[in-house]
Image (cartoon, coloured by chain):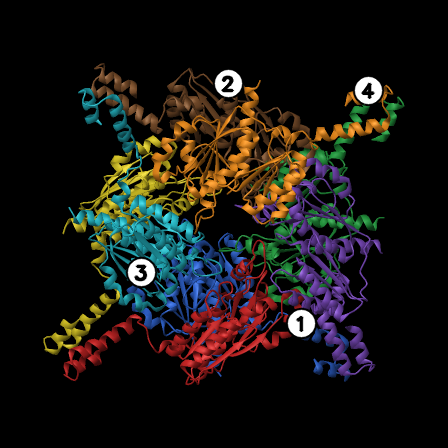
Chain colours: A red, B green, C purple, D brown, E orange, F yellow, G cyan, H blue
Amino acid sequence: MRETLAALEAGEIGVEEAESRLAGYATTDAGRFDAARERRRGIPEAILAEGKTPAEVAALATTALETTGRALVTRADEATAAAVASAVGDGDPDATVDRDDRTGSVVARAGDFEPPSLDAAVAVVAAGTADAPVAGEAAVVAREIGAAVDRVDDVGVANLDRILDQVDRIREADVVVVAAGREGALPTVVAGLVDAPVIALPVSTGYGVGGEGVAALQGALQSCSVLTTVNVDAGFVAGAQAGLIARAVDAVRAE
Amino acid sequence: MRETLAALEAGEIGVEEAESRLAGYATTDAGRFDAARERRRGIPEAILAEGKTPAEVAALATTALETTGRALVTRADEATAAAVASAVGDGDPDATVDRDDRTGSVVARAGDFEPPSLDAAVAVVAAGTADAPVAGEAAVVAREIGAAVDRVDDVGVANLDRILDQVDRIREADVVVVAAGREGALPTVVAGLVDAPVIALPVSTGYGVGGEGVAALQGALQSCSVLTTVNVDAGFVAGAQAGLIARAVDAVRAE
Amino acid sequence: MRETLAALEAGEIGVEEAESRLAGYATTDAGRFDAARERRRGIPEAILAEGKTPAEVAALATTALETTGRALVTRADEATAAAVASAVGDGDPDATVDRDDRTGSVVARAGDFEPPSLDAAVAVVAAGTADAPVAGEAAVVAREIGAAVDRVDDVGVANLDRILDQVDRIREADVVVVAAGREGALPTVVAGLVDAPVIALPVSTGYGVGGEGVAALQGALQSCSVLTTVNVDAGFVAGAQAGLIARAVDAVRAE
Amino acid sequence: MRETLAALEAGEIGVEEAESRLAGYATTDAGRFDAARERRRGIPEAILAEGKTPAEVAALATTALETTGRALVTRADEATAAAVASAVGDGDPDATVDRDDRTGSVVARAGDFEPPSLDAAVAVVAAGTADAPVAGEAAVVAREIGAAVDRVDDVGVANLDRILDQVDRIREADVVVVAAGREGALPTVVAGLVDAPVIALPVSTGYGVGGEGVAALQGALQSCSVLTTVNVDAGFVAGAQAGLIARAVDAVRAE
Amino acid sequence: MRETLAALEAGEIGVEEAESRLAGYATTDAGRFDAARERRRGIPEAILAEGKTPAEVAALATTALETTGRALVTRADEATAAAVASAVGDGDPDATVDRDDRTGSVVARAGDFEPPSLDAAVAVVAAGTADAPVAGEAAVVAREIGAAVDRVDDVGVANLDRILDQVDRIREADVVVVAAGREGALPTVVAGLVDAPVIALPVSTGYGVGGEGVAALQGALQSCSVLTTVNVDAGFVAGAQAGLIARAVDAVRAE
Amino acid sequence: MRETLAALEAGEIGVEEAESRLAGYATTDAGRFDAARERRRGIPEAILAEGKTPAEVAALATTALETTGRALVTRADEATAAAVASAVGDGDPDATVDRDDRTGSVVARAGDFEPPSLDAAVAVVAAGTADAPVAGEAAVVAREIGAAVDRVDDVGVANLDRILDQVDRIREADVVVVAAGREGALPTVVAGLVDAPVIALPVSTGYGVGGEGVAALQGALQSCSVLTTVNVDAGFVAGAQAGLIARAVDAVRAE
Amino acid sequence: MRETLAALEAGEIGVEEAESRLAGYATTDAGRFDAARERRRGIPEAILAEGKTPAEVAALATTALETTGRALVTRADEATAAAVASAVGDGDPDATVDRDDRTGSVVARAGDFEPPSLDAAVAVVAAGTADAPVAGEAAVVAREIGAAVDRVDDVGVANLDRILDQVDRIREADVVVVAAGREGALPTVVAGLVDAPVIALPVSTGYGVGGEGVAALQGALQSCSVLTTVNVDAGFVAGAQAGLIARAVDAVRAE
Amino acid sequence: MRETLAALEAGEIGVEEAESRLAGYATTDAGRFDAARERRRGIPEAILAEGKTPAEVAALATTALETTGRALVTRADEATAAAVASAVGDGDPDATVDRDDRTGSVVARAGDFEPPSLDAAVAVVAAGTADAPVAGEAAVVAREIGAAVDRVDDVGVANLDRILDQVDRIREADVVVVAAGREGALPTVVAGLVDAPVIALPVSTGYGVGGEGVAALQGALQSCSVLTTVNVDAGFVAGAQAGLIARAVDAVRAE
């Protein structure tokens, strides 16, 4: 700020220019949108396809691509994925569009988008097959932020040996996301087995009282192990937070 | 019934006697209180001491002793236990009164009360020290019904090896009660490790959302393992149900 | 373990063989998946048809059949039942597929599958016609585990004599499942009339506050009789727990 | 109204007098407080003693006595009852003050208060001893409205014969109040046994999920029998509604 | 009972005959189904059409008609009403089928069914047009029980004069049902204006927190006026209870 | 901002001075604490006495007095009021301390504090005596903001004529606060009778389901009249919002 | 009233005429529907199109138009808007029908309807695009009441500078409506930045626990800033209350 | 494992020694308690003083000290702190006991305990003074794990500039904990301003609906910013998770 004022005093810039620069300064000081911020954080712009038409999703994805170089569409059916691919291709022939069939996630990247690559690993652990799509959302986001992601599936606590068999593998990660529905015991068990920070990702399975992920979320909040949680089915948030932790670790590695 | 009617027809009994006997019959047929039932089921009369004065508890215990030969007082402090011992001793010098200091349970038995002994075992498993008093209630009830009770404490899932170390021991039981508060993951884990029926006993630990045992109860209702549950802190019910299963097993053993 | 180590010390086996044996030991010790366990417990693999296509259900049923010799599909419509029958027949011409029209349950068994038969009886009691399908799920599971199952329908407490008429019949069972929706008073009433363990099975009937089975579940949790409960509509769990109790009784009978 | 207007037109009364009379008329027409109404309905003024000092309760009771000839204090301890008796006696030496020790209800009546007497009967049924005080509140109110009240205690459904033994007696009432806590099955059972209207009175017993009367209230709302309900522990409301029904019956009898 | 026993003693009847008679006696004594009861109470058999096919409803209605002489179908669309009319007509050419277009209620009566007629009046009051169908259910049931029913519509409290205009009319009823959704203030206001017993009938209108009738039900439970309530949308229960009160009044009138 | 920059360019001020001024500007632009804001809004600093010692409250009040010229203590008992008076008098002999005995509110003002006076009126309406303290909080706050406040008490809807008698008086206010607990029908009724904006103030009366003000709050949210609401017992917020509306009206009057 | 009575006394009018006038008077006095009230308040008649057929909506709109000169249809799709336009045009060729495509609101006005115009401004602020339709409802209602409405969109707190950029603009309003879903932090932030009264309008976005606007509503109720709230998605109520406040301000401006 | 077996084969160790070593191995493989783990993770043993006597707390603290070298007592009053200091000093004269008066946290360390020191920073941000004690718990735990902790207090969103003033400071942290009660908007606002991972820590302030931290927790779960959360008042968990992230960062820095 002082620099700008000095320039003005020195007559190097005029009042309008100073006003414009200080507007930028003041607002940066106050938290104003920092165009570089999303780039620094590396979280892709996310679009939930459920409840939107393929055309609406395609339009949103195109805008995201143009402004951030990338778009993440979650829970997209084949028609939506096709609409996105077509719209994105029209705007940028070099753009790439990848769909993960298991999770319905679609990632579109501009031709000149350079995906980040972090020297940090995220393990995404899922209790059962019903938990895989939500876990997949977390994995895609973390990967787009640049983390190395290791998926560990079907390790529900009803057959405890399954998770015990995978402990060494999970221990190699810098941060762990654990997706589970029903009673949601897995995040607690995993957090008791590893040293890295664990993020619980409750999944909306189960019917009756405590169903739709409510028991799993409450189990995470009450866990006798140390862990934090996101809301039910919030795969995007869990993956993004894991990615932010991976970025923190990577930033240090890069020092 | 036919027997009574035949006796009446044969003149062996009069109308009044038949009426009296049939009253008994009809009501037995219809579910009327069967004085022998409590004896057959063997569930002790239970008195919750919390919220009652020592004198009130002592009076209730004395009545239970006189009508059923036995009384179980739960969550009794020392003053209450003393009042019960004194009142019971006044009424029946041969009566015995035992207090379990850890759980605050007091069992009083008439001098001529013959405790049942079943050829069946109940394992009562508790996750942490805070779960022990409620687990203790379950244990006392099951033992009074006559089961051999094995207490397994401090096997919470945050340190999974603790429960793994005790699996063989728990597998020896005919039925298993598992007490846990907080996130209540232990009943699900145990039910995945043993073949016997498992009864979850949620405990009112934990604060915040899902606290006071709510998360633990919902976890039992949503368990991905096969188990049934009782309400939060319902140690008496869990122990009594385990005792009834033990009795069923014993009845067969005794055939 | 000591045996294996002694054999190694004695030179009867080599290091690799010992390592392999101990791996087995350690993991058995730790709860690792015991291939024989499902066979011992006898609980059929269950597939909920609701929300899945006939093709998806058929594929899951085929896999279950191949790995466990049996599959239980619940809430299947006719098209799904037909798809299962066709898929199962393609893989194993000797397989059998039975559909219970009332409950929509489909049981498929491999040609060489030998269904268990236990010397123990389960009574499955239902309050009203709306409770029958869920009760039916419990009955099918208990029967597949090998129990002799007696269905007692339409004995809701609004006409108390209906249940009183059936008390003697219910008393013959080793364990009783009681399905009821709305206010769910029946499990409490039945548990007051029989000596065997009672499992409440709340059903998602009723609208307004406490509807969808919530009042029935809370009624079971608050029951002034001794009983345990499962979640709303959890017919599979109730039947499986009843089957496990029946197996415990049978195991003793078989001694 | 026409009468007053005619009197004004005829010069029999002036404008001010007419204005005054019409104010009365208009407001009566519109629901304005009808001094005779409380007398016609006969519901005593009720004062909840819990959370008030003896002096506060005494002051409120004195005012009620002066304006309505009667006061009903609920849940009063001995000190409060004494304070009421003293204050009432100071104001009106002929007043009477009666305390029901079991329920803690205190009824004070002015010396010239003529208690109503209806030719109609209310049965007040209670499941267990814990339900008696709340049931007692209902009984006192109904009795003060003038109904003949029959108390039927300790007829909980866990021992079904108890209620069956009392059915004939309950059937003699014109209206039935049924107080029950825990799972609250009794109102449903009673409504299935009698022809008269039944009012459920849930009681705040029970701990854990559904405790504090919540399960009992939901059970009443979901009842498969025809009945209406009041809120948990609302003994006053249940008794007053029963009294209003008794009054309706009596009014007809008196025709 | 004594009579039967005396006849047996006298040899007038044999043991088998006595056994049969006593079975009947015992069960009548105990509450066994009394074929005459439904007739005495006069509550029609009700069938909720929602969620059932026209054919299913028609079958249920036919059975109800055959066993009770009457059927009440609620929330029936035109196709369902037609199916009922056709099925009923096939079985009993003299049967009548009436549909209330506003509420979707269909009443079918056998040709020889003699509808009861009580000398007692029920007012059914509704706050808004959205409350009318549920109020209509209550009205139909009360009318079928035999009460004279007066419908008072569109008297919501947002325009207080509407209800004030109708107070005199409502005061003529022996019992009042008040249907209201949203905030449900109307039952409280009405109960403050009339002397007869008031039954609140909360209606599932309103969105957001407290929506679907929850606020209206809680308002009834918390009312500062004396009233009882039924569950949300339970028009049948409210009407049946009002009918039972009308019957009690009529029974006295008929003395 | 341009002004400051021009002054700098003109050499009228130096860089440091400009920096300092712009810091003020930037933060004012961004919402930085405006020392004059509280004065402009006129909302007194509030201190909830419940749960604090008299000394703690006195200290907080003294600080508030020093920084804002005024303090409002709510729910203060006599000891707390005395402590506040003593502490305030020590610091500022000219300060005044007034206690409203009915509501327990204490207002302390510095000797040089000039209370605002608005040309706008707030009516504060309360249903029953239990609602008066919370209504009193609202009244005190609105009065301190400078509004003319009219208290209207004991106009609950159970006796509708009470509120009808006061309608003309309430209609004179520019904004109306309506405090009611239990079923909370009064705000809806009042909003149907007046043209001014109505703010509902639910009060934590009532026990059982919907008690503690929950039904009253939901009734406000579901009201069929136009009104906004504050949380249960939030008398301060209701009074402050009414004061802000009065200020808006006054500001215009003052134009 | 006195006037009418004097006229009667003077013989200027007869009893019937006086009776008729006084009926009007009495009821006006008591709150009876004042035909001029809706005109004075200026709130348009609102019809929620969701869940109604185009024909039903058109019929309701026509009636509203005829009785109040105006109709507001919310959440109307194109077909419904067309049906309304057609029906309105049939009845009144001079009527106008405007549809706001973004919110789906349709405003129909009779040819002779003179829309009010207030000298007062309402700011309607929305956090994100998902909040715009509900905010739009509020804006339409406020505008129809006559307020000058300023829409401020996309100022969610996740990018704080967006709202900071718009503070000056929002500060120009006399009253502010703030629509936000998810965590609903925006109303609290805005109320901390402006002096005018703020009305929170929670929006039903968000899934999982606290979703569907529940967290946003609770956030408004718990706000540490001064504000009042309406129910989730109650755009009509928020806009109408803002309009009433604007009218109060305008009324003073017009003095 | 192979090493041990080879040693046994070679006769270097006996069967018992091998058995002992393998027990260690097997259990380590399976997750068995690793004595070194707590040391690696560095989370201190925590004891909640609330609800325990000073003597009980002192005993627990002594045990923790002996087994882990350190104890953290939370919410301790002065008497408890003194009891801990005395007991710890008795056992280990070189031990140190520090109490944080603001939060009531007591940290006891054995004389030979070497506290960890991480090259990573945690910011602990609190909205208001009521949030400080819970934030303090988080700070103490993070500091004990070895992180550099920066406390930022009194930055609630009602005065947005307070948080804006501190943004640069908060941005220096590697991970941020944000404690807030009431509506809990602060974590969302902070997570929109910084790049580091944010952990929400809801605090149990606020009364009425959404009070006791429920609104704050739901706000965190619904946040439109990326963040994870812990349960209400779970300062220990938030601080421990922040510490684990700091450790991950430090581990990399140390590479």
The residue carrying mark 3 is G125
State the residue in front, C202 or A18: C202
Asked whether the beta carbons under mark 3 and mark 4 sit within 8 Å of each other, the answer is no
The residue carrying mark 1 is H27
Asked whether the beta carbons under mark 4 and mark 1 sit within 8 Å of each other, the answer is no
Report the Cα–Cα distance between label 1 and label 2.
Answer: 80 Å
State the residue in front, G235 or A9: G235
Residue D199 falls in image quadrant? top right
Q: Position of residue C216 (x, y in %)?
A: 60, 46
Q: Position of residue D138 (x, y in %)?
A: 52, 29
The residue carrying mark 4 is E6
Asked whether the beta carbons under mark 2 and mark 4 sit within 8 Å of each other, the answer is no
Secondary element under disc 4, as helix, strand or loop, is helix
Question: Where H19 sits versus B213, above or below?
Answer: below
Q: Label 3 crowding class (10 Å Cα cut-off): few <14, some 14-19, many 20+?
A: many
Residue B27 in view, yes or no: yes
